[in-house]
Image (cartoon, helix red, strand yellow):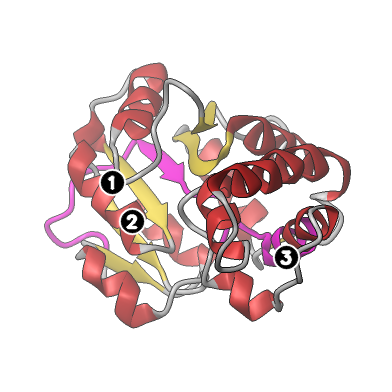
Amino acid sequence: MSAKAGMPEIDGFIFDMDGTLLHTLPDLAAVTNKALELEGFPPHTEEQIRTFVGNGALALARLAVPDGATEEQAEKVFRDFKSLYGEIGLSLTSEFEGMTETLKQLHDRGKKLGIMSNKFEGGVKDVEAKFFPGLFDVSHGETDTIPRKPDPSGLLLCAREMGLDPARCAYFGDSHTDLIAAHNAGMLAVGVAWGYQPLETLKTGNPDVLIDAPVDILQFA
């Protein structure tokens, strides 16, 4: 679908991280399985872990622990996950083809760039610094004061920090939760088809536009 017909002019480009900006699944799987191992729990395949991601690390830990595990055990896996992510969580991550060049073109066109992820904020900052130094104006993840999507609080914070009306912002994500958050924030909701959620599920978030490759982002600029 073309982004031009009937679409508002977009000045702020805000992105989900895992499955949208970066292919992080191999690292998510490795870190999750190491955290499970520390608690004596069995590992999961990468494809199984793909079905757990999208709602933050605590939700991932709760899904990854075996049936019968306590909430305390899930929270311990979550704490181990956060600790391990800083140590080993970036070695297998890669960008989706053309993403950095697309972001540079947006930056050169004077567009504001942001990240809003359900990943814990420390992980967001580490990944941004390694893969996209100097490109983003704002970046946030889940904190005690920023709830997980589909709550729009993080997206609205990004818009405020960029000095933009939410209606002049687009949010790009690979899950229906991302799209619901965009709608809740009054932003253009753009679904990316290269991510981790099946297309049929992504469409339940009612995307304003679906795109197939990072280069397609430029049609909004």
Question: Residue 212: horizontal and vertical position, in percent?
Answer: 44, 75
The N terminus - image quarter: bottom left
Question: Residue 32: horizontal and vertical position, in percent?
Answer: 72, 58
Q: Residue at x 19, y 42 (%)?
A: 184
Question: Residue 108: horizontal and vertical position, in percent?
Answer: 56, 38
Foreground label between 3 and 2: 3
Foreground label between 1 and 3: 3
Q: Magenta residues?
A: 3-31
- For the residues labelled 2 and 1, say whether their Cβ atoms are less than 8 Å apart: yes
Q: In this view of the protein, which residue sits in the foreground, 122 or 166?
A: 122
Q: Is residue 15 above or below residue 136?
A: below
Report helix, strand or loop for mark 3.
Answer: helix
Q: Look at mark 3 in the image and give the residue it sits on.
A: 29
Label 2 to label 1, Cα distance in Å? 6 Å
Q: Look at mark 1 in the image and give the residue it sits on.
A: 181
Which of pointers 1 and 3 lies earlier in the amino acid sequence?
3
Q: Amino acid at mark 2?
A: Thr
Relative to 137, 101 lies left or right: right
Report helix, strand or loop for mark 2.
Answer: helix
Q: Is residue 56 magenta?
A: no
Label 3 to label 2, Cα distance in Å? 21 Å
Q: Look at mark 2 in the image and give the residue it sits on.
A: 177
